[in-house]
Amino acid sequence: MGCFGFLKGMMVFFNGIIFLAGAAVLGVGIWVKVDSGSILNFLQNVEQAPSELGQLLNVGYLLIAVGAVLLILGFLGCCGAIRESRCMLLLFFVIILIVFIAEVAGAIVLLVFKPLAADLINQVGSKAVKSIKEDYGKNKDLTGLWNTTMSTLKCCGFYNFSDFTDSPFQMETDTYPPQCCSNTPCTFVNSNVTGCLPALMKLVDENTVVIIGVALGIAALELAAMIVSMTLYCKIGSKRD
């Protein structure tokens, strides 16, 4: 009973934290999408706040999705342990297992099938460039997302500045996004500003050790969660038999 009680307590504690974190992330995501006006006013009142901060509103949907997943996982793990519900614990185990398998599959694709990954990146790139040429400067959400990405990574376009040629923004203003230039208005493109794909690849290369460490840590936590949940599942079953 001592071991069972300890595992149950750990399950409740950590999943309670996950539940609260998920609720907080979900709440922020909903607030961002529902009350964007007050957030923009707040950001504009922050001293020396860059104008690009307003584009952070575009992460609202991502926050909602992540928060919802964390909320569900935390609820299943915490409530399943407290109520000693084998159904909840099993569902918790299955969700973590699916996430773990997806992560392993993604790692295998990146490590073993690099040409396939390169083809996939090129396909994504062609679609990204097409969306820029059709909607940048016309679609508010897409424009804001690209502005935020370019400001964060200090890059210009998916491949380079030419991605914006003939886009609604370039056709209307006869300029390029300010992130692409060293001068304003952006009529002369600074060739030293790289595309976002090369910038992202460089960032990954420079932080490979950190990324691997974080990935292994997450995998270890997921394995521990699956082991504990399945142990509780079996212990609860043996108690009832």
Image (cartoon, rainbow, N blue to C red):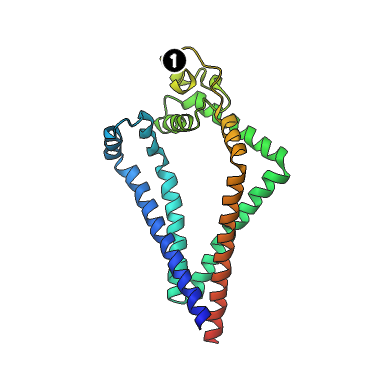
The relative height of residue 64 versus residue 200 in the rendered view (above or below) is: below
Question: Is residue 68 placed above or below 79 in the rendered structure?
Answer: above
Instruction: Quickly name the residue at label 1.
Output: 183
Q: Mark 1 is on which residue type? A: Asn
The residue drawn where x is 53% and y is 85% is 239
Quarter-of-image position of residue 94: bottom right
Please give the name of the residue rendered at 46% of the width and 65% of the height, measured from the top-left corner.
Answer: 14
Q: Are there few (<14), some (14-19), or many (20+) residues within 10 Å of tag 1?
A: few
Q: Position of residue 65 (x, y in %)?
A: 45, 50
Q: Nearer the viewer, residue 44 or 83?
A: 44
Nearer to the camera, 116 or 74: 74
Q: Nearer the viewer, residue 46 or 163?
A: 46
Q: Nearer the viewer, residue 132 or 103?
A: 103
Looking at the rendered structure, the secondary structure element under dot 1 is loop
- The outermost residue toward the bottom is 241
Q: Residue at x 61, y 48 (%)?
A: 212
Quarter that holds the C terminus: bottom right
